Amino acid sequence: MELDQILEKRRSIRKYAKGDKLTADMVRTFVEAAIEAPSWKNTETARYHVVMSYEKIQALREKSFGSWNLQNTENVQALAVTTFVKDIAGFQKDGTPDNELGNGWGIYDAGLQNSVFLLKAAEAGIDTLVMGIRDASAIRELLEIPENEEIISVIALGERGETPEKPHRRIVDDIVKFY
Ligand SMILES: Cc1cc2nc3c(=O)[nH]c(=O)nc-3n(C[C@H](O)[C@H](O)[C@H](O)COP(=O)(O)O)c2cc1C
């Protein structure tokens, strides 16, 4: 599939069909592609905690989502918790921030990676939903995520049970200024 088609096909899916297409090896290929993304001084601080067992998926949904994302994630085949290792990207070796954004660069790098992850999933026929509305403390406790990692999003993966309309998008002239 051409990149333009993948960009068009990827949608946030909030209704999943029952399915079993997704394998751990497929998720590995999404991460492998994501690793190709650029990062601050090539520090590569993004991490993924991928939950694929049915019981653990249900526990994660119930403990860390409110009613909205609980409803959105019925029948998902995996939940990938995205994190980044703090105080490295955007910082010098002695811990001094390189500029005013500090750990904002770690989030930036993880976002760049996550975007590739979503597109590779779409290319493989796997649908996704990025969720920022989640309880980070509950996730940390359940998956025993170390304190040096900041929890960012949870990405649901599965097979679409709906075909949503493409949401409104701005046009290029709304967001670009050429100098
Ligand atoms: C950082 C981030 C956090 C998001 N959090 C949620 C969420 O908690 N629940 C949800 O249903 N959608 C969430 N979304 C999905 C957005 O609402 C969605 O990407 C946007 O409406 C555009 O739709 P599209 O992805 O189909 O193009 C999130 C997206 C991003 C990038």
Image: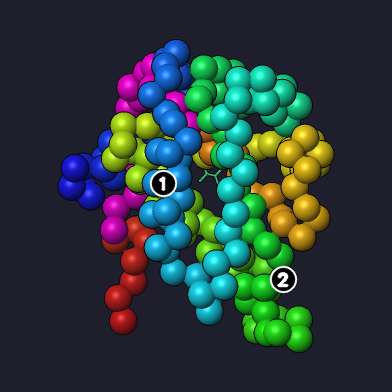
Instruction: Please say whether residue 167 is one of the residues in the magenta stretch.
Output: yes
Q: Quadrant of the C terminus?
A: bottom left
Instruction: Please say whether residue 64 is one of the residues in the magenta stretch.
Output: no
Foreground disc of the pair 1, 2: 1
Instruction: Write the residue at 80% across / 55% down.
Output: 147
Instruction: Write the residue at 33% across / 22% down.
Output: 163
Check disc 1: other Cα within 10 Å, few if <14, some if 14-19, many if 20+. Answer: many
Say if residue 158 shows up in the picture.
yes
Residue 22's place in the image compared with 86, above or below, is above
Q: 142 or 105: which is nearer to us? A: 142
* Residue extending furthest toward the top: 18
Residue 30: mark in rendering: 1
Coloration mode: rainbow
Instruction: Write the residue at 29% across / 61% down.
Output: 173
Q: Position of residue 129 (x, y in %)?
A: 49, 34
Instruction: Write the residue at 65% across / 82% down.
Output: 99
Q: Amino acid at mark 1?
A: Phe
Say if residue 167 shows up in the picture.
no
Residue 102's place in the image compared with 106, above or below, is below
Residue 110's place in the image compared with 50, above or below, is below
In this picture, which residue range is highlighted in magenta?
157-172
Could you tell me which secondary element the residue under label 2 belongs to? loop
Q: 69 or 1: which is nearer to us? A: 1
Q: Which residue is mark 2?
A: 87
